Amino acid sequence: MEWNNLHRHRLAVIADLVSKVPAGQMGRTMLMNMCYFLQELRGMPLGYRFTIYSYGPFDSEVLSDLASAVNLEAVKSKVIPNSVGYGYQLEPGPNAPELISDGKEFLHDHQADLTWVVAEFASKSAADLELESTAVFVDREAFEKKESISLDTLVNRVNGLKPHFTKEYIRSRAQDLVEKQLLRIETFATTPRWIYSFTR
């Protein structure tokens, strides 16, 4: 995809997500993870290259695109004090409709994906988003290596990356993702890999 079109599509997605999430709930962590879920779980062609980081999968280009959206006044970013220092609250800016309109064809093609990611994850805490996106990252990493891993193995690997979560809690969140067919673990022994394609 041509870079200018890719950048335009990314900005439209960011403006659309910020507009869809109820006021006061969208922050940088949520935006980062929603972009990750859209790309990895729904196959949306955003072209990001995520690596694992402090708050889950991360690509600095998401923040660069967010900065562009803020500069274009399509998104408003406010610093909000919290118990660990501060965070960022994202809200639609006056030019959000223009940016959304600029990418309307791409957004139309992926409207079901955008609606799904907001319905599935907008109400979750930053901590749960961090945990669940990390579980997906570990799962996809194993899949790319053609490695079959069990739920126990995934729990141990996520706990190694995120030791502030208990194994019991990691297991409960991972099991929920398995039931929604968002993870591929513990399916290889009885089910062909191809069945577990992206949920659409």
Image (spheres, grey):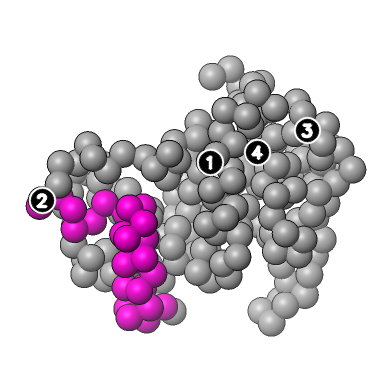
User: Measured from the top left, where is residue 35 in percent x and y?
Assistant: 56, 46
Q: Which residue is mark 1?
A: 113
Q: Which residue is mark 4?
A: 13
Query: Residues under labels 1 and 3: Cα distance?
Result: 18 Å
Circle 2 sits in a helix, a strand or a loop, which is it?
loop
Q: Which residue is mark 3?
A: 99
For the magenta stretch, what is the residue range? 165-189
Quadrant showing the C terminus = top left
User: Measured from the top left, where is residue 129 in percent x and y?
Assistant: 51, 63
Query: Residues under labels 2 and 1: Cα distance?
Result: 28 Å
Q: Are marks 1 and 3 in contact (CB under 8 Å)?
A: no
N-terminal-most mark, 2 or 1 = 1
Q: Amino acid at mark 2?
A: Thr
Q: Amino acid at mark 3?
A: Leu
N-terminal-most mark, 3 or 2 = 3
Query: Residues under labels 3 and 4: Cα distance?
Result: 9 Å
Q: Which residue is mark 2?
A: 190
N-terminal-most mark, 1 or 4 = 4
Could you tell whether 7 is left or right of 92 in the image? Answer: left
